[in-house]
Image (cartoon, rainbow, N blue to C red):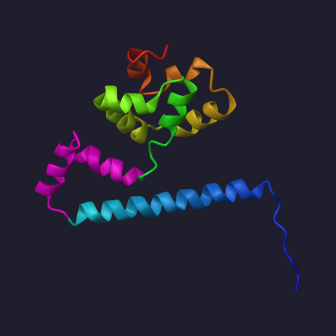
């Protein structure tokens, strides 16, 4: 029996691809759930979360890990996310929403990986103003 070896540089790509597929499937499931609710129920859920119905649908479309870069950014800025949960929950929820809907995730992920201390993220991050206001300068 022949053993096939996979170059190690391909594994991260495979894991990344698998993770994206899992996120996509989760997003489809969430959208399917929303599709089965009435518009009034969707509006109630959105209201309970402090969102518009359209934002709720957009967030569901992005998947459960859509705001995964936010904790990494907060950590790079030496901000205690647990403290934010207790001290400024509304600000944290808003930052999660903006991060989840952000269109510059690739750039953010690269910046966090390559140069987390560089302030260039402030030019494209929708949370820059909020992070500045909570004292991350």
Residue 136 locus on image (x, y percent): 48, 17
Q: Is residue 54 magenta?
A: yes
Query: Residue 125: where, in percent of width, then height?
Result: 47, 27
Task: Specify the principal SS of the magenta part.
Answer: helix
Give the residue displayed 54% in from the left and 23% down from the top. Answer: 77
- Left or right: residue 91 compared with residue 4: left
Confirm whether residue 104 shows in the render.
no
Extreme-bottom residue of the structure: 1
- Near-viewer residue (77 or 2): 77
Total marks shown come to 0
The percent coordinates of residue 120 (x first, y second) are 58, 20
Q: Residue at x 33, y 48 (%)?
A: 58
- Residue at image point 14% right, 61% down: 38
Q: Nearer the viewer, residue 32 or 103?
A: 32
Q: Quadrant of the N terminus?
A: bottom right
Q: Does 130 appear above or below 42?
A: above
Q: Quadrant of residue 84?
A: top left
- In magenta, the rendered stretch is 37-62
């Amino acid at each position: 029996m022949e053993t096939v070896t996979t170059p190690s540089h391909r594994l991260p790509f495979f894991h990344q691809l698998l993770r994206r597929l899992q996120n996509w499937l989760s997003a489809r499931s969430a959208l399917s759930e929303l599709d089965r609710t009435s518009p009034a129920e969707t509006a109630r859920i959105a209201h309970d979360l402090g969102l518009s119905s359209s934002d709720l649908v957009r967030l569901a479309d992005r998947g459960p890990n859509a705001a995964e870069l936010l904790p990494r950014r907060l950590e790079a800025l030496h901000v205690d996310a647990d403290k934010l949960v207790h001290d400024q929950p509304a600000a944290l929820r808003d930052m999660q929403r903006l991060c989840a809907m952000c269109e510059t995730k690739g750039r953010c992920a690269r910046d966090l990986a390559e140069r987390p201390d560089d302030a260039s993220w402030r030019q494209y991050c929708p949370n820059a103003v909020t992070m500045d206001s909570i004292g991350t300068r």
